[in-house]
Image (cartoon, rainbow, N blue to C red):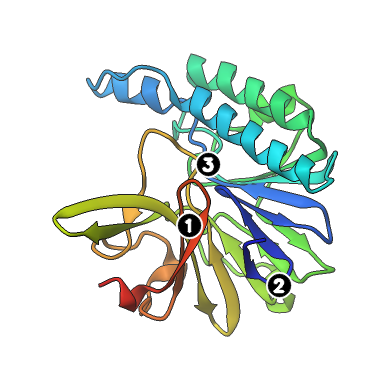
Amino acid sequence: MNEILPNIEIVDLAVFLPKSNVLAISDLQLGTEEMMVGQGIFLPRFNFKEISSRLEKIFSELKKRGVKQLEKIVVNGDLKQEFGKISEQEWNEVLDTIELLQKHCKEIVLVKGNHDMVLGPIAKWKNLKTVEAFYLDREKVLFLHGNSTKILKEFVEAKTLVVGHEHPAVSIREGVKTETFKCFLKGKYEGKNLVVMPSMNAVKIGSNVLREKQLSPFLKQDLSNFEVWVVEDKPYHFGKLKELF
């Protein structure tokens, strides 16, 4: 068990809340390759394949724990990549991803990210709706993408905030070799627990929080006492960020 907080466990790049039987993933950004082609950068299309494989690994791990079907899967923002349109790649890959998730849960919750401004038509195709945030009243956990600190009514009650958007990563040095890994962060925001999820996107590892300027307003603070869980073959607790500088 890799608990980042009581009743919030790390399962690969996802978080699992066993009491509510809820899984959350974030920042898939399907359609990344087609967007990059439009910018003159040509990449083989592997993001969807890698994400699907990773999701199957997560579902397999949960089945080993006796979880046959999840109550809910929360996509915590940025399911797709393009801001102002829906590309052909996005249509196909988002629909296929939703179908994969539906095999493993009773309900999908689509939290709107900053890349999801026109996700509605695809969601409607699958009889789904997008929401600004998702609140688990029992655990007092609020899922929101993390690109805005817009105060929601559930924010006041929530004891824990779970956000994406930042795509956190850290560089680990061993001798002359340095390697960057996706990671979870845990800290505080206005007295509440704050969990920052890594992206599921396989094209980019993420933003090195040790060196790069933070994007999320939730992280525009001193991060030195935030705790780090690096995700590789399994989650590894690396202590506090200040210990990695």
Q: Which mark is residue 78?
A: 3
Q: Residue at x 66, y 49 (%)?
A: 24
Which of label 3 and label 2 is nearer to you? 2
Instruction: Using the numbered discs, state the Cα–Cα distance from disc 3 to disc 2 in whole angstroms.
Output: 26 Å
Q: Report the side of 170 relative to 218 (left or right).
A: left
Mark toward the start of the polypeptide (3 vs 1): 3
Q: Quadrant of the N terminus?
A: bottom right
- For label 2, the crowd category at 10 Å Cα-Cα, with few meaning under 14, some 14 to 19 and many 20 or more, is few
Where is residue 225 drawn, in percent x and y? 41, 81
User: Which element carries disc 3, helix, strand or loop?
Assistant: loop
Count of numbered circles in the view: 3
- x, y percent for residue 55: 62, 35
Q: Identify the element where label 1 is drawn.
A: loop
Q: Secondary structure at mark 2?
A: loop
Determine whether 126 is above or below 184 in the image. Answer: above
Q: Which residue is denoted by mark 2 in the rendering?
A: 6
Q: CA distance from mark 3 to mark 1?
A: 10 Å
Specify the quadrant that holds the C terminus.
Answer: bottom left
